[in-house]
Image: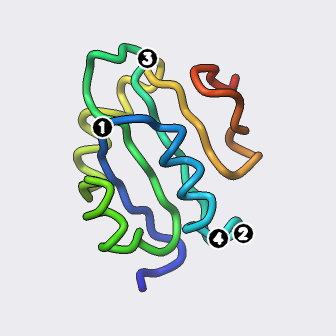
């Protein structure tokens, strides 16, 4: 298990909402663990991104769901500069709160 303050970055294609519901069960909602999903507003571009604070996602889950681990350098290069082009959903209410699929939370 990784240090609880560390962040892990994952990429996936497909429906963000299904992954969100699954991650609610996998990631403990507490001060040390939470997650967010970044969905591109342009559905024809790129991958969805999962950022997990705390433990890494189980390898079996990632393999089964075609989720690929990436690194912070990739995040900083391709995602962070384009934050305004993503809908961001998270399980910690301080960041965002989930709404119906297709409706992004306002920050």
Verify CB contact (< 8 Å) between mark 2 and mark 4.
Answer: yes
Disc number at residue 41? 3
Disc 3 to disc 1, how far (Cα)?
13 Å
| Mark 2: few/some/many CA within 10 Å (<14, 14-19, 20+) | few
Residue at the image position 71 percent from the left and 69 percent from the top: 31
In percent of width and height, residue 69 lies at 26, 59
Q: In this figure, which residue is indicated by the disc labeled 1?
A: 13
Disc 4 to disc 1, how far (Cα)?
23 Å
Image quarter in which the C terminus is found: top right
Between 63 and 47, the one lying in front of the other is 63
Q: Residue furthest right?
A: 93
Task: State which mark lies toward you, 3 or 1.
Answer: 1
Image quarter of residue 35: bottom right
Residue 103, above or below 76 = above
Task: State which mark lies toward you, 2 or 4.
Answer: 4
The image shows a total of numbered marks equal to: 4
Residue at the image position 72 percent from the left and 69 percent from the top: 30
Q: In this figure, which residue is indicated by the disc labeled 4?
A: 28
């Amino acid at each position: 298990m990784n240090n609880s303050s560390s962040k892990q970055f994952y990429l996936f294609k497909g429906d963000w909402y299904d992954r969100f519901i699954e991650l609610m069960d996998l990631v403990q909602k507490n001060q040390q663990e939470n997650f967010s999903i970044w969905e591109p507003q342009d559905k024809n571009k790129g991958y969805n991104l999962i950022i997990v604070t705390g433990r890494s996602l189980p390898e079996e889950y990632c393999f089964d769901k075609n989720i690929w681990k990436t690194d912070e350098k990739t995040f900083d290069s391709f995602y962070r500069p384009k934050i305004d082009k993503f809908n961001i959903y998270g399980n910690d209410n301080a960041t965002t709160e989930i709404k119906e699929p297709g409706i992004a939370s306002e920050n």
